[in-house]
Image (spheres, helix red, strand yellow):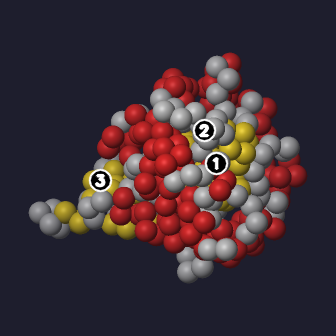
Amino acid sequence: MSQLSLAVDVGGLKLRNPTMNAAGVLGMSSSLLKRVYESGAGAVLTKSLGPTPRSGHPNPTVVAVEGGFLNAMGLPNPGAIHFRDEIRKLKLSGIPVVASFFGASIEQFVEVAGVLAEAGADALEINCSCPNVGKERCLLEADPDTVEAVTAAVKDATDLPVFVKLTPNVTDISEGARAAERGGADAITAINTLRGMAVDVDARRPVLANVTGGLSGPALKPVALRCVWEVSESVGIPVIGCGGVSDWRDAIEFLLCGASAVQVGTATATYGLGVFHAVTEGIRNYLVENGFGAMKDIVGLAHGA
Ligand code: RRO
């Protein structure tokens, strides 16, 4: 096996390879995230953390659908302050940590960012794209002006790289991407889940207690690829692809569309943690077999010269 390096710098965050777990997947404890890193991820992401503990929505919160899952977790999390020790434990092991976080106001975003930076996070991912809660709890699918203002306020409050995770539940995702870039974002994560629903024909009711949820998994991949394509044509900062990455071919598709790194979520449930090693080694083999000397050589290649 060739040892071509897959190391990458994503908006100032240096990674040994371009894979991470998606926020919300396996991010509830340092022990799980340590396993993610030991399984080969380049960095780990926490579950989205807010200013106070939240228990989330009532069950059922997850349902398997054609090509993936619908979730309506409702932002369950222990609160940023209670998660500080988990971040510290990961840092003691030298693991790059991206802290995903949210707030109901710009002030809350800034407050939580401060807690996570102080705990030792290496980068922050602003979640202003949760599909499952109202605007009063998270700046839901935030409009471009709000994305810009939140990003600028967080960037003012910290020296850490700041990623902004965007929602696909808008007409034009490039507006949100440009707004994040104007606010000073160091990278864009595209995309969060796509709103959908499932119906139980026997109960004649929606399956999820929340009625709607966010679609993840292979069914989301074509939408995510399109979003990465459009975002990478709209901004000059790196893009992190997220949505339906299950194997190395999916990852290569995202890189060709303009992503510099990928996040893996649903596939960890389908294939287990071995997916990180399989994706990175598959990328490495693809580069070597096709005569590329570095990963950056294929980022955005599908856009043409
Ligand atoms: O917790 C959730 O319901 C959730 C979040 Br915060 C998110 O960003 N995306 C998602 O699909 N679910």
Residue 5's place in the image compared with 93, above or below, is: below
The CA distance from mark 1 to mark 3 is 42 Å
Pick the quarter of the image with the C terminus.
bottom right
Q: Is disc 3 in contact with disc 2, using a CB cutoff of under 8 Å?
A: no
- Residue labelled with disc 2: 4
Residue 274 x %, y %: 40, 34
Asked if residue 215 lies left or right of residue 28, the reply is left
Residue under the point 60% across and 79% down: 172
Where, by quadrant of the figure, is residue 260 drawn? bottom right
Q: Is disc 1 in contact with disc 2, using a CB cutoff of under 8 Å?
A: yes
Q: Secondary structure at mark 1?
A: loop
Kind of residue sitting beneath label 1: Gly
Classify mark 2: residues with Cα within 10 Å, few (<14), some (14-19) or many (20+): some
- Residue labelled with disc 3: 63
Question: Quick one: 33 or 205, which is closer to the camera?
Answer: 33
Q: Which tag is nearer the camera, tag 1 or tag 3?
A: 1
Residue under the point 32% across and 44% down: 270
Q: Which tag is nearer the camera, tag 3 or tag 2?
A: 2
Where, by quadrant of the figure, is residue 268 drawn? top left
Asked if residue 191 lies left or right of residue 11, the reply is left
Residue 275's place in the image compared with 105, above or below, is: above
- Ranked by sequence position, the earlier of labels 1 and 2 is 2
Q: Does residue 159 appear in this view?
A: yes
Residue under the point 19% across and 63% down: 200
- Ranked by sequence position, the earlier of labels 3 and 2 is 2
Residue 161 x %, y %: 77, 47
- Ranked by sequence position, the earlier of labels 1 and 3 is 3
Kind of residue sitting beneath label 3: Val
The CA distance from mark 1 to mark 2 is 8 Å
Kind of residue sitting beneath label 2: Leu
